[in-house]
């Protein structure tokens, strides 16, 4: 049977030592942040993840969701767990106190989200989608809409969904056909079909707030004619309660490879009443508010699944006895040594752990910058933080899910044939992790977003928000002999990233296929360098604590050792990626379509 323990000590290190969130007490939501408060939140969050959500993960996968007569029933125990979740105030952890939320920083919400998705990804999709709806309405809705919907979303009484994809179009939203017909009372009648709608129908909440992309009658073709609408499952009464059923329903649920406890629905809108959010034909702007929030959340899912896979693989490797160490028996009193003595098993475990801790640092850094972009009083700081988040979001989403999936597979590999058996739980993590590379924009789409939209924006202004502080860190640390083993590999990899960026900029102008062909390798290189930057910074902090004789010697010694491993065994991949990037598009475009 699998186990899970939230990595609270590493989270604590990132929040207090790496990000130093206590120094932002001048910002809204940070006023009462202290090590004691973060410890309390992490500890209580760990309890609900470990004791309430995790025990339902395997059983929820085995049972799945049930669909009958348009209604969806979630797996046994989910309703009770959701009640515990909402009663504890977790649904509104980062929501505005004005609407009943806890008002905590986004970075604290991301730490808790990692716990929930690691413990039970299927369960985590329900409150996760509601959080995205909350953000979109808060950013783009009218005061009346905020007052009507945000309190119920913040306390978890109502759920939420994002309705983008249609049977004939996914990423290319300009092709969508869902119609919105204006009514005399200012509402719209929404008609169309949406597919792959996570949490589109379920029994956890009394109402579900659907955010639906549709085209108002007579609107321009393509993405310029898309608007966003609030379409509640049940209409709201004048007193804010639940009224009559709207003409929005679930036609079926998908039978999926993974996340079987999460209802993935076909949603049919048959003249359903909808309310416009923001201005007509400006739905894409509101959509990206949801998508950015969701993409960070999905990146966290990749990390969370990698973390739980690592924990179980490491435990198994220390217990499973098979063969002898190639340097001689380590446990001569037993028939065999535990498999953790074998270098290749250690390679897999160290690769997983180095990714997990580096990815966690990157994700939390981005979450903090979302807080700064929203709350900092200095406009220049807000702009810089927003630019950094915009640049890094496709990297966080794609790199953390791609590498997270690879990591989960390594975890299964550590089990050998036993990993393929349901009992140990590892095969579920592989199946669940696979979706993270697909939804909220596939990895290929994220790579195209990075090279096609983010790199050239504002003449490279976004890129400077990552390149400049990284270069400054390298320059500042180069003279420190204790940092040489970390800074030199980082500097070399950064130089390769700069070279690849220049190549894409030059060749992509001549032929866009060059940028497209390089995009996935470039995004992976960017992710590796970003994690190298995180590891160098963490090594500097832990090295200083070791030199000063601080507490938790073993923790910081392990950090430094993992940093060495990443620099020597993971970061050098940037060299081969540079070769692949500069190989160009001709190799990919050489065959005619009918030759495939």
Image (cartoon, rainbow, N blue to C red):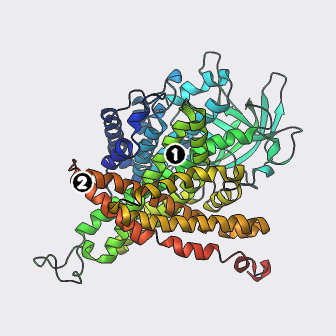
Residue at 65% across, 16% down? 238
Indicate the quadrant containing the N terminus: top left, top right, bottom left or bottom right: bottom left
Q: Can residue 69 be seen at all in this image of the molecule? A: no
Q: Is residue 352 above or below residue 289?
A: below
Mark 1 or 2: the one toward you: 2
Q: Is residue 94 above or below residue 295?
A: above
Image position, residue 230 (x, y; %): 69, 32
Residue at 22% across, 73% down? 338
Depth check: 553 or 124 in front? 553
Mark 1 in CB contact with mark 2 (< 8 angstroms): no
Depth check: 41 or 430 in front? 41
Residue at 53% across, 23% down? 99
Image position, residue 118 (x, y; %): 41, 51
Residue that mark 1 sits on: 125
Q: Quadrant of residue 345?
A: bottom left
Image position, residue 95 (x, y; %): 51, 30
Residue at 71% across, 40% down? 285
Mark 2: secondary structure: helix
Depth check: 226 or 527 in front? 527
How many numbered circles does the render carry? Answer: 2
Residue that mark 2 sits on: 547
Q: Is residue 174 left or right of residue 118?
A: right
First in residue order: circle 1 vs circle 2: 1
């Amino acid at each position: 049977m699998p186990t899970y323990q939230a990595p609270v000590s590493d989270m604590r290190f990132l929040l207090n030592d790496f990000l130093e969130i206590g120094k932002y007490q001048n910002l809204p939501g940070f006023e009462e942040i202290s090590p004691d408060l973060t410890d309390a939140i992490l500890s209580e969050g760990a309890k609900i993840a470990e004791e309430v959500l995790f025990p339902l993960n395997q059983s929820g996968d085995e049972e799945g969701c049930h669909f009958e007569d348009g209604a969806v029933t979630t797996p046994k125990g989910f309703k009770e767990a959701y009640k515990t979740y909402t009663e504890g105030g977790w649904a509104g952890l980062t929501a505005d106190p004005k609407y009943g939320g806890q008002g905590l920083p986004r970075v604290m919400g991301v730490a808790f989200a990692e716990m929930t998705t690691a413990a039970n990804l299927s369960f985590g999709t329900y409150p996760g989608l509601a959080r995205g709806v909350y953000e979109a309405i808060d950013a783009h809705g009218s005061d009346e809409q905020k007052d009507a919907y945000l309190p119920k979303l913040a306390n978890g009484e109502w759920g939420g969904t994002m309705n983008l994809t249609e049977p004939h179009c996914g990423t290319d939203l300009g092709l969508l056909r869902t119609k919105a017909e204006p009514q005399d009372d200012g509402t719209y009648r929404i008609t169309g079909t949406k597919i792959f709608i996570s949490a589109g129908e379920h029994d956890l909440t009394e109402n579900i707030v659907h955010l639906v992309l549709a085209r108002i009658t007579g609107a321009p073709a393509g993405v310029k004619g898309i608007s966003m609408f609030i379409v509640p499952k049940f209409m709201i009464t004048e007193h804010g309660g639940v009224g009559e059923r709207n003409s929005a329903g679930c036609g079926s649920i998908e039978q999926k490879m993974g996340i079987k406890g999460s209802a993935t629905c076909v949603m049919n809108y048959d003249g359903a009443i909808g309310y416009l959010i923001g201005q007509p034909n400006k739905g894409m702007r509101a959509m990206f508010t949801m998508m950015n929030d969701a993409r960070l959340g999905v990146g966290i899912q990749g990390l969370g699944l990698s973390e739980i896979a690592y924990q179980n693989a490491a435990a198994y490797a220390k217990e499973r006895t098979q063969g002898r160490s190639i340097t001689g028996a380590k446990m001569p009193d037993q028939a065999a040594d535990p498999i953790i003595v074998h270098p290749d098993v250690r390679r897999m475990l160290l690769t997983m752990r180095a990714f997990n801790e580096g990815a966690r640092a990157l994700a939390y850094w981005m979450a903090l910058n979302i807080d700064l972009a929203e709350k900092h009083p200095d406009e220049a700081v807000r702009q810089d933080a927003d630019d950094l988040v915009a640049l890094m979001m496709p990297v966080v989403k794609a790199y953390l899910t791609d590498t997270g999936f690879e990591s989960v597979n390594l975890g299964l590999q550590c089990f050998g044939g036993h990993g393929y058996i349901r009992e140990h739980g590892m095969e579920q993590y592989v199946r669940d992790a696979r979706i993270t590379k697909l939804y909220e924009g596939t990895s290929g789409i994220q790579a195209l977003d990075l090279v096609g939209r983010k790199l050239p924006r504002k003449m490279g202004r976004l890129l400077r928000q990552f390149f400049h502080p990284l270069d400054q860190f390298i320059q500042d640390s180069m003279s420190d002999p204790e940092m040489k083993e970390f800074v030199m590999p980082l500097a070399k990899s950064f130089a390769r990233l700069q070279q690849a960026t220049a190549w894409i900029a030059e060749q992509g102008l001549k032929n866009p296929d060059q940028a497209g062909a390089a995009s996935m390798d470039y995004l992976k290189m960017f992710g590796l360098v970003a994690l190298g930057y995180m590891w160098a910074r963490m090594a500097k902090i832990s090295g200083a604590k070791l030199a000063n004789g601080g507490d938790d010697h073993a923790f910081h010694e392990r950090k430094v050792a993992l940093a060495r491993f990443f620099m020597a065994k993971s970061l050098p991949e940037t060299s081969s990626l540079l070769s692949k990037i500069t190989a160009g598009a001709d190799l990919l475009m050489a065959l005619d379509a009918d030759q495939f």
